[in-house]
Amino acid sequence: MSRWTAKRKEKKAIKHKTHDHASRGARLLALADDGRPGHDSGRAQKLAALGCPVFACTPDQFPDLMAHALGRHDLAQWAASGDIALVRPG
């Protein structure tokens, strides 16, 4: 087996293992005073289709968002409680 093939298999194994351990992520579209997202809506919808919460928030909301993210709380629920719209899967 070539070195390149071995490296490729190793990367696949790591990716698979990370997925098995329920890695989590969220995508913040914009951090703006008005909380309006400036983004590529097609990409945002694709990320949402993967089950990732995708939204925008204001700078005032950001510390609370980070606290919830670091605490592994449900970010979709956090966004809903703050009347923050999530991007819907496309």
Image: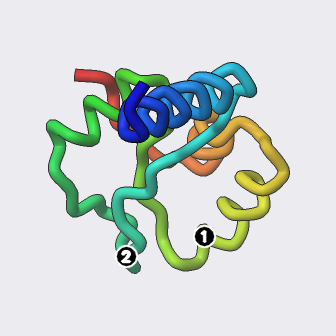
Vertical comparison of 12 with 64: above or below: above
Q: Name the residue rendered at 66%, 60% in the picture.
A: 65
Amino acid type for the residue under numbered disc 2: Ala
Q: Is residue 13 left or right of residue 51?
A: right
Q: Is residue 33 left or right of residue 82?
A: left
Amino acid type for the residue under numbered disc 1: Phe
Residue 51 in the image, given as x and y percentages of width and height: 48, 24
Residue 52 showing in the rendered view? no
Residue 23 in the image, given as x and y percentages of width and height: 66, 35
Q: If the image is split into quadrants, where does the C terminus sit? A: top left
Q: If the image is split into quadrants, where does the N terminus sit? A: top left
Mark 2 highlights which residue? 32
Disc 2 is placed on an element classified as loop
Vertical comparison of 21 with 87: above or below: above
The foreground one among 1 and 26 is 1
The foreground one among 75 and 3 is 3
Mark 1 highlights which residue? 62
Q: Name the residue rendered at 47%, 63% in the picture.
A: 57
* Residue reaching furthest to the front: 1
- The quarter of the displayed image where residue 20 is located: top right
Vertical comparison of 30 with 40: above or below: below
